[in-house]
Image: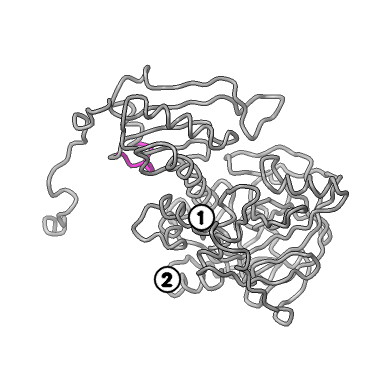
Amino acid sequence: MQEYISKLLDRNEMRIVDREVNPKHELAAVVARSQKESALPILFKRVQGTEFPVVCNLYGSRSRLKEMVGAGERGFCEHWAETINDAMLLGDDYPTVVDMSGELQKGQLSDLPQIVWREKDAGPYITAGVAIAKDPETGVPNLAFSRAMMIDDKEMRCCIDVVQDLAKYHAKAAAMNKPLEMAWLIGVSPAVFMAACTSISLDQDELKIAAQLNGGALPMRQCEELDLLIPADTGIVIEARIRPDERRPEAPFGEFMGYYCKENRGYVADIAAVSWRTGSYFQGLLCGSRDDLTAIYATYATRVYRNLIGELPGIIDVACNTTLYCTIVKIDKQYEGHPQHVMLKVFATNPHYNFACMVVDSDIDINNLNDVWWAFLARGPVDKRTMLIDNIPGGYEYPEDNLHRGRIGIDATAPYGRLDEFRRTSTPGEDTLNLSDYFA
């Protein structure tokens, strides 16, 4: 991440805060306010209680994501799907192990920024740390995100959702009556961060995606206290062991859904070591903001795209907009009923998150909900182009409220063979002329 931040600074593409800020609410408030007017990343040079500068909103722009993964002029989903497929062809010899023992500084959890993000958060949280662990049976590593509440220098409490591969790893370790060794990587390269956002099957190695972006190899180093290899260029590393059979109160916390998740029984992480490279940045992430959602939306849309492209014709692009729960698919309509086939395939891609699917024609901007809803309302009867599926649970199901249930599909395409009748009006020259030639 240090290299990428240097590039952004050289291009004058970061907002810089020189004054000292309070890590409790003030830092997050600046991030939230800045995001309302700018997509630029933010560098906080001075944060109370720590020597580490803090960087936020690195991943809050679709154009930066495309730059990070080398998509160029191609669509993100098309390029990222190809990158994943190529990565899975790499051999297991992609890691190049390096010795960094003389380059690392060691400290404690309290040396790091203690950021309280939202008004009702239970305490300071690590939000942008990439969690890495390996399958206790096969040794296959997994990259994921697991928010971690900082209790003291010896303990954190983390959230591992039942739908995550980390939960399966922990269950395997617990069956052996062993703790799960896991590290939080803060300030990773964009390649590692984007790999962590990506979901592949349990037996596949997500680090290969980072290696693919890195030219087919990935420098790795050994953890200080754990039997775990981690990317060598990681800025800050928190090594921990997750207890097999104990939970303690964790949350409330303002999550990606846009509201607070309730207090729950969090996994207990015993801190084994904290280390960092000289000059490291602490990456923070305001959950539910564009920094949190842009990368997740893009990589999740790619998951849907990969499942659709091999099964159905006419798939052009996919987006999640404005929430992870809503998938929008752009198609070249091949037959009546084509959108309904797309909807059913989308719902099957991940039953934990795909609550809504909207299907549009090739001329619609799937990242503009005004355009999407115009297509639905203007191109056919609203009462004949919806699909409701009752009483299907989602991934975040609270037994007492049945909140996340059901599915809705919306066909916003024109009738098959009649798209030209519904083309948007336009005036030649409106997108190409220079208004300065006309207005003084």
In screen coordinates, is 436 left or right of 297?
Answer: left
In screen coordinates, is 365 left or right of 235?
Answer: left
Residue plotted at (31% across, 39% down): 364
* Percent coordinates x, y for residue 332 in the rendering: 31, 37
Read off the magenta span: 364-370
Query: In the rendered image, which quarter contains the C terminus?
Result: bottom left
- Main SS of the magenta part reads loop
What kind of element bears circle 2?
Answer: loop
The amino acid at mark 2 is Asn
* Placement of 112 over or under 140, stated as above or below: below
Residue 164, image quadrant: top right
Q: Report, in whole angstroms, how far the alpha carbon at label 2 lies from the one at label 1.
A: 31 Å
Q: Which mark is residue 382?
A: none
Q: Which residue is mark 1?
A: 84
Residue plotted at (47% across, 49% down): 298
Q: Which residue is mark 2?
A: 12
Residue 109, image quadrant: bottom right
Query: In the rendered image, which quarter contains the N terminus?
Result: bottom right
* Percent coordinates x, y for residue 72 in the rendering: 37, 61
What kind of element bears circle 1?
Answer: helix
Q: Nearer the viewer, residue 323 or 173?
A: 173
N-terminal of the pair, mark 2 or mark 1, is: 2
Residue plotted at (59% across, 64% down): 91
The amino acid at mark 1 is Ile
In the image, residue 367 lies in the stretch drawn in magenta: yes
* Placement of 263 over or under 127, stated as above or below: above
Residue plotted at (35% across, 29% down): 412
* Percent coordinates x, y for residue 345 in the rendering: 48, 33
* Percent coordinates x, y for residue 277 in the rendering: 67, 75
Give the foreground label among 2 and 1. 1
Give neighbour class at mark 1: few <14, some 14-19, many 20+ (Cα, 10 Å): many
Q: Nearer the viewer, residue 354 or 146?
A: 354
